[in-house]
Image (cartoon, helix red, strand yellow):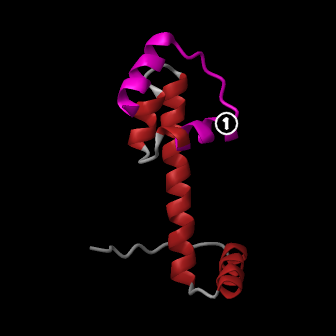
Amino acid sequence: MPVTITTRVEDDLADVIDEVAREEGMDRSTVIRRFLLKAVRNWQIDRNLDEYGKGRLTLWQAARRCNLSLWEMIDEVRKREIHVPYTLEELLEDLKAVQ
């Protein structure tokens, strides 16, 4: 069930939201929901890739936590230019999960 959340934003931000709404043919609430969804998704990916980088998760585990496929998570790693040593054990675990 949807929950109503209210917040105050600066005038400049409200103007940008209204501009996006006009350009995209949406109402203000839809624009805000889409922005929030994208921001939360990026936060989840960043957080789980940070855990991956620290060796606390495999890439496959990070992908599952973000509801992404392994290939989508690999693309995220590339976009963020994350360079992490990948052990043979991690590769084998990821390959087992893909099968």
Q: Quadrant of residue 78?
A: top right
In front: 16, or 66?
66
Q: Main secondary structure of the magenta part?
A: helix
Q: Residue at x 49, y 11 (%)?
A: 88
Position of residue 12 in the picture relative to residue 21 (left or right): right
Where residue 22 sits: x, y (%)? 68, 88
Amino acid under label 1?
A: Arg
Residue 57 visible in rendering:
no
Residue 59 visible from this viewpoint: yes
What SS does tag 1 mark? helix
User: In the drawing, does residue 5 fall left or right of residue 36?
Assistant: left
The residue beneath circle 1 is 78
Seen as rendered, the residue at the extreme top is 88
Q: Nearer the viewer, residue 99 or 9?
A: 99
Q: Reply yes or no: does residue 79 show up in magenta.
A: yes
Q: Which residues fall within the magenta stretch?
A: 72-99
State the residue at coordinates (36%, 25%): 96
- Assess whether residue 61 is covered by the magenta stretch: no
Q: Is residue 17 above or below residue 25?
A: above
Q: Quadrant of the C terminus?
A: top left
Identify whether 82 is placed above or below 40. Answer: above
**Residue 80 at what x, y percent from top left?**
67, 38
Q: Residues within 10 Å of mark 1 (few under 14, many from 20)?
A: few
Which quadrant would the N terminus be assigned to in this image? bottom left
Coordinates of residue 75 in the picture (x, y in percent): 61, 41
Rendered image quadrant of residue 60:
top left
Residue 45 locus on image (x, y percent): 52, 43
